[in-house]
Image (cartoon, grey):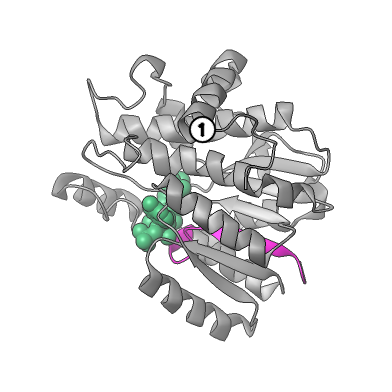
Amino acid sequence: MTGKNCVITGANAGLGYETAKAMALRGANVMMVCRNEAKGKRALIELVQASGNQNIYLQTADLSSQKDIKAAAEKIRERFAIVDVLVNNAGTWISNLTFTEDNIEKMFAVNHLAYFYLSHLLYPAIARAADGRIVSVASDSHFQGKMNFEDLYLTKKYHGLRAYAQSKLANILFTYELDRIKPNDNVSTYAVQPGLVKTDIGVKHTNWLHAFAWKVRRSGGVTPDIGAKTQIYLSTADEVKDQSGKYWDKCKPKKSSKRTYVEADAQRLWKISKELCKIDDFFKDSL
Ligand SMILES: NC(=O)c1ccc[n+]([C@@H]2O[C@H](COP(=O)([O-])OP(=O)(O)OC[C@H]3O[C@@H](n4cnc5c(N)ncnc54)[C@H](OP(=O)(O)O)[C@@H]3O)[C@@H](O)[C@H]2O)c1
């Protein structure tokens, strides 16, 4: 990985932090995309100390904001003309129906649309890499998920679990569709299930009951360094180059839910995502 340019979203905590650390230890140039500047700076200092790698950079962005994503992508492309690896990792779990400044339900915006939009904005730089990779962190929660196309934001019957599961299903539909239609053979894309991991995702924007339930549930999980192994593997291993468009768990491909293989749903989601991000052609440079 020495000299390769890697962009990791949500790199200040949990799985994203461990992924950034693994890249830094392997000598990559690492761009951490973080919402909170103070947390991001703290994590960056820790990573430089832990790895001895000075080529670690911080880009702040609230990934619920399309304006922020675009501004961040511009800065990232100023720094990296080529992006070898993009890890779409930042994710959130929100108990109450919440809307972003773009008037999009927030879990759909952060967990799916930010993956879609950032991948689009960085795609020209990823396509310039000899072996470009887009790794999207999904979850086995998608097995409980359903695309509610008639009420995508679940306004009629919102529940955090439903919104989260739908957003993680969207990650896999996005990965499969991207793999089907991408014009570049040198670009690969993968979706990942990290397993149950002891992170703070379920205590940040949740009510007391959901926070309590997450604390109990995560006690049976693995630590973030173990949970991050598959996304690190897909970002770095030579042997997965020809295995684009699959769902991975414990460093092996596995079957995802039946709903992830419905191509019509993937196409519909792709079209909606393009409209919401105001994109004409996903593969055309819009910066
Ligand atoms: N933990 C699990 O058991 C598990 C299982 C399956 C899948 N996953 C997936 O793994 C990924 C990482 O989650 P995690 O468990 O490592 O959680 P985490 O420790 O809470 O990390 C999530 C990261 O995303 C960032 N983030 C959240 N909302 C953001 C926004 N609007 N803009 C920019 N950054 C934002 C967080 O920033 P802040 O620190 O500022 O909040 C943090 O850096 C997620 O996609 C999640 O769905 C996790």
Magenta stretch: includes residue 4 = yes
Q: Amino acid at mark 1?
A: Lys
- Left-right relation of 196 to 5: left
Q: Nearer the viewer, residue 258 or 102?
A: 102
* Picture residue at 17% right of the left edge, 47% below the top: 207
Rendered position, 219 above or below 47:
above
Inspect this view and state whether residue 101 appears: yes
- Compare residues 101 and 190 and report the one nearer the observer: 101
Residue placed at 73% from the left, 56% from the top? 84
Q: Residue at x 49, y 35 (%)?
A: 277
Q: Residue furthest front?
A: 287
Q: Is mark 1 within 8 Å of ligand 1?
A: no
Q: Position of residue 67 (x, y in %)?
A: 44, 49
Q: Quadrant of residue 151?
A: top left
- Above or below residue 9? Residue 183 is above
Report x, y in % for residue 101: 31, 43
Estimate the x, y position of residue 247 in percent, counting from the top left. 63, 36
Secondary structure beneath label 1: loop
Q: How many marks?
A: 1
Is 125 within the magenta? no
Q: Is residue 82 left or right of residue 228?
A: right
| Residue at mark 1 | 278
Quarter in which the N terminus is drawn: bottom right
Q: Position of residue 22 (x, y in %)?
A: 62, 68
Residue 199 visible? The answer is no
Residue 255 occupies quadrant: top right
Mark 1 neighbour class, 10 Å CA radius: few under 14, some 14 to 19, many 20 or more:
few
Q: Is residue 152 above or below residue 239?
A: above
Q: Which one is in front, 42 or 168?
A: 42
Look at the image and give the residue range highlighted in magenta: 1-15
